Amino acid sequence: MNKELYDLAQWSIKTAKAAGVDACRISTQHERFVEIQYRDRKPETIKEASTKGLGIETYVNQRYSAQHTSDLRREALEDFIASAVASTKLLAEDPYRTLPDPRYYEGRPNVDLGIRDASYEALTAEERHGMVKAIEAACLAKGGPKVISVTAGQHDSRTESIVLTSNGFEGVRESTTFYAGAEVTIQDEGDRRPNGYSTASAVNRKGMPAPEQIGTLAAERTLDLLGARKIDTATLPIIIENQNVPDVLRGLLSAMFARNIQQKRSFLTDKKGQKIASEHLTLIDDPLIVCGLDSQLFDGDGFAAKKRTMIEAGVLKDFYVDWYYGRKLGWEPTTGFPSNLIVPPGKRSAQEIMKDLGRGIFITGFIGGNSNPTTGDSSIGIIGKLFEKGEPTQAVAEMNIAGNHLEFWQKLAEVANDPWPYSSMRTPSLVFTDVVVSGV
Amino acid sequence: MRPFTRRSFLQRAGGVASAAVAAPILSTGWLSLARADEKGYFDSIFGITDDLCRRVLSTALSKGGDYADLYFEHTIANYVMLEDGKVNQAYGNVALGVGIRTVKGDQVGYGFTQDLTPESMLAAAATAATIADASPNKPAGEFVTPKLANHYPLERLLTSVPLESKLPLVQSLNEKCFARSPLVAKVNAIFHDEQKRVMIVTSDGIRVEDLLPKNWLMASVVAAKDGKREQAGWHLGGRKDFSFYTPALIDEIAREAVDRVVVLFDAVQPPAGEMPVVLGPGVTGILLHEAIGHGMEADFNRKGISTYATMIDKQVAEPFVTIIDDGTNDGLTGSLNVDDEAIPGQKTVLVQDGILRSYMHDRISAKHYKVQPTGNGRRQSYEHFVIPRMRNTYMLPGPATPDEVIKSAGQGIYVQDVSNGQVKIGEGDFAFYVSQGRLIEDGKLTAPIKDVNIMGNGPKMLRNITMVANNLEMSRGGAGFCGKDGQRVPVGFGLPTCLVKSMTVGGVKARPGEKRA
């Protein structure tokens, strides 16, 4: 544990109490990161820094505010905390604003989540540069003469954070993150220059794909975009590629937050226990996955982390209920925000499913769009491949899908067997039938 | 580094961020000692002398960089929110630090520190220096300060406005929203203010300071009718003095927010597919931002990855189309007295009379193209290095009237309000999300529509602008921002009513007489 961060948090609690808080939560963080990008086989950017920060949530006479600062000079912090407390007193009283009941802190699992790579400190500049060079080289080799530009890069970081509350919570999280990717631009007909990319993230170096794999995949995904055009508006089956599923899943998740429910901004308010999707959709929130990017032993309120089934065979089982909005709703809290999200995989590959579907669109990217959490209405642009007789035939662009989440998820017909492992949202490709895809 | 190819705009009016970064409501103390017109803030408060800057710049150039700069930032942001009738939440953020950049050709080394001690700054400079590998260079011996226009004068510092003066804004806005319609069920009212002080010191001998205010007042409203709920919002703001927030302005926000949500109960689904699209004036300028703006940022063109990379001096639109990117508009969100690499704020004509004339440059791309920088070098904060970004992007008025434009559309849709957009630079394909609009039937505005994504291709869309009206409006919202390469910066835009003869409208409903596969 970082003693300097811990001491700073303890000092801040004492200072806040002296300034008149009834209760407070202090979080301190330290991050070190290195970021390198290559283009034209030379470094384009090199960035490296260490950051620190302190956040304080103050509770005074049932009033609440939260502040964050990167100015950690002690004299500045004293002013900062005193001003924060003084200002909190000016806000309206809110009886729901308290620190959580400490019994929710209990039961924290005593497991090693494996989210800190012990070899991080040994990573050398040469290794970092070598990895990025390898990504770029593989991408250029696969892309061939059509390549206009390749930007390859990596980002790694080590983060330590400590959270203390005045009612006895102490939490430490130490983690590492590795990220790498490549972005490719190629020449198409006329002035069209398709951009594509591939990226991956993991908490340790062993969890990352080989650099050559990242580079090759980036080139392949970009070449797949050649000749894209829009086709006639039609009702078709669609397959949403695994790594793009989170873009549509977030529209569903936004309606599962207690804040949106309490503020009447959720289309799922009265849907707990009801079937909101086809039987093929199960969604699990699991903060305890070993080496998960969002694995944690405690959540933002300090609640002991716990695996939860949010949707089971299409039935909405739970909401994301934090301490504050749980009290406002009169509901038992669960956890405020998602951690690692799992959609259990099916049995067949997306390619096998495609063969059965005949004609449809394999969606490999989204553009623009939005989802209204109050009504469930959603509309989003798509990029991908038209497939006919089970085989990809034509890249498509400038097209769109739309609908309401309560209807859309009922059209989920199958889940593929390919969960995307390089994200905290481990989603397989999903197959929907009878979707209106608008184009010409 | 984050994915990559998508550049997007998002504004907050459609909802309230659940994890808002807001402000410590700091109203007194040393933070407010300096006056808005006072120079030497970083010297007087933090002891950043010319000698120290030269030492740090020397270290940044110690391995042969061509150019280096220092970007000092001290930002204080506050955010108060009313929920369920009470101003019961406040947030704050203080950002203090310096970013140090070394440039070698088109390569960038970057380090930053939040600790403004000589030791920490020299260490960050040494990190930045590693982008080069040659004999040391030296910074200029003296610094000069260019004379700047002030496009966002303040009567008083935002940090000197006490919290007690801000609370009535959101309380009044809440009351006015509920008074406007019995259908109103929930109101979130938010006031955000931010005061950013920056100092930029360059190795070619410029030292310049700026004080950038940014603030906005917003209502996000949920209404209920016959068992259905809808939400909408409205916000006004920019780089304003606190005196901007008058009772009349609060009336306007409440009226717009409530009227925009109530009308949604009558909204219908538009038909899907290609059709004429009329863009109403103002916030719909997001179309320019996505369709042409990002593609005209010079870094994408320098690298050959923009669809506009070969179009300079070519006809890209009808002769009545002129498009500007401008840092000199008084009080608008994207205005800049000086950009983040010490180039004075200015106006750049991107498309003149239908011909593409200029990209938006930072120092690196300007050197590449052998032109002067255009003042578009921007960054989110001291943690980020400069890249070319838009400021306020707008189209000049044309010869038609708004009624003529709508009539000419025949059958199509009218876009009134937009919540977000996104573009793929190389293809030019873009999307923007229509939160409010109308059907156009027989050349007239009819039923309201909502929640529709519109797709297009930038160069194609430019060629398809067939009419421009005489009613340019600049968006007056203050909460909009643009995302690129993991950096957010505030931007503005404007548009007169104009007709795009064909774009793809997302939806599920068939057009009259349409047969689908």
Image (cartoon, grey):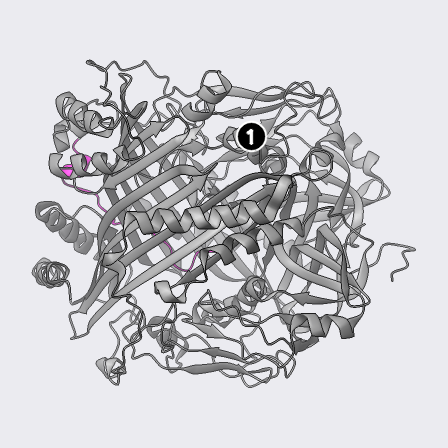
Residue sitting at 19 percent across and 14 percent down?
B141
Q: Position of residue A62 (x, y in %)?
A: 24, 67
Q: Secondary structure at mark 1?
A: helix
Residue sitting at 35 percent across and 26 percent down?
B341
Q: Position of residue A187 (x, y in %)?
A: 66, 38
- Left of B446 or right of it: where is B127? left
Q: How many marks?
A: 1
Residue A346 vs residue B74, the one in the foreground: A346
- Left of A415 or right of it: where is A38? left
**Residue B403 counted in the magenta span:** no
Q: Could you tell me which chain the residue with mark 1 belongs to?
A: B
A160 vs A73: above or below: below
The residues colored magenta run: B15-33
Toward which corner of the image does residue B489 lie, by quadrant?
top left
Q: Quadrant of the C terminus of chain B?
A: bottom right
Q: Position of residue B204 (x, y in %)?
A: 29, 17
Determine the main secondary structure of the stretch shown in magenta: loop
- Left of A138 or right of it: where is B128? left
Residue A67 can be seen in this image: yes
Q: Position of residue B279 (x, y in %)?
A: 69, 38
A76 vs A103: above or below: above
Q: Which residue is mark 1?
A: B301
Q: Give the residue type at disc 1.
A: Asn
B204 vs B280: above or below: above
Residue A284 vs residue B81, the one in the foreground: A284
